[in-house]
Amino acid sequence: GTQDKPVICCRPQHLIDKKVNGWLQRQVVCFKKGNLKLSRQERLVKELQWDVQKAVDFCTCYRFEEEWQDMYTKLCEFYTSNGHSNVLATEHTDLSKWVSRQKEEYKKLRQTNKPSKLDLHKMHQLKDVQFPFPKYIAKKFKWEERIQQLKNYKEIYGDFKIPRFFDTARFPGL
């Protein structure tokens, strides 16, 4: 039988025709804004079996990947010139902002298990240029421990209105 081929988001540069990709991105933008004529939508669906959602997702992902690779190339150049990847915020503003975003994505991935745009491949690329990943200490609390902490807090304060930045170190029972 035939198998559905997975949609590949990050394609090798030599397989991407930038003019065709740019045209497709413009069609997606027109569609998202409601400006793509119905006759054109119908042709894309009929002649190309165009899946609008996959196209929207692909264009968004491609643009992100292209921007990520461009900034990574700039970081590699910085690394080659300076021997490190600690980009100061006062210099190379765009690059320093990008580095900060990568650190935030890393924190999401490592500390909170939230979805992150930083995947294993990108992490390896960043390690190649001695990227200054933030250090973290994983604290894992069992459910029962958290329940006990809440009980202790309520016993002391009479409610569950815990301040966002509550210093538990000052209160050993919590």
Image (cartoon, rainbow, N blue to C red):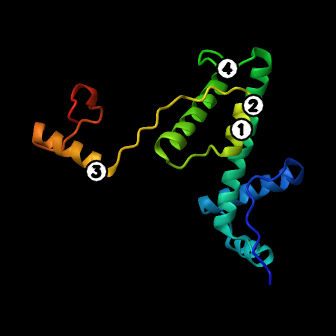
Callout 2: helix, strand or loop? helix
Left or right of 161 in this view: 116: right
Give the mark nearest the N terminus, 1 or 3.
1
Q: Which residue is found at the position 66% from the left and 56% from the top?
A: 29
- The label number, if any, that marks residue 128 in the structure image: 2
Give the mark nearest the N terminus, 2 or 4.
4
Q: Amino acid at mark 4?
A: His
Give the mark nearest the N terminus, 3 or 2.
2
Are circles 1 and 4 on residues that touch, CB within 8 Å?
no
Point out the frontmost of discs 3 and 2: 3
Callout 4: helix, strand or loop? loop
Left or right of 166 in this view: 86: right
Taking depth in this image into account, of 84 and 91 the one nearest to the observer is 84
Are circles 2 and 1 on residues that touch, CB within 8 Å?
yes
- The label number, if any, that marks residue 124 in the structure image: 1
Q: Which residue is found at the position 75% from the left and 59% from the top?
A: 8
Residue pointed to by mark 4: 92
**Label 2, label 1: how far apart the Cα atoms are:** 6 Å
Are circles 3 and 4 on residues that touch, CB within 8 Å?
no
Residue pointed to by mark 3: 144
Residue 39, horizontal then vertical, whole percent:
72, 74
Callout 1: helix, strand or loop? helix
**Label 3, label 2: how far apart the Cα atoms are:** 41 Å
Point out the frontmost of discs 2 and 4: 2
Q: Amino acid at mark 3?
A: Glu
168 above or below 4?
above
Quadrant in which the C terminus is drawn: top left
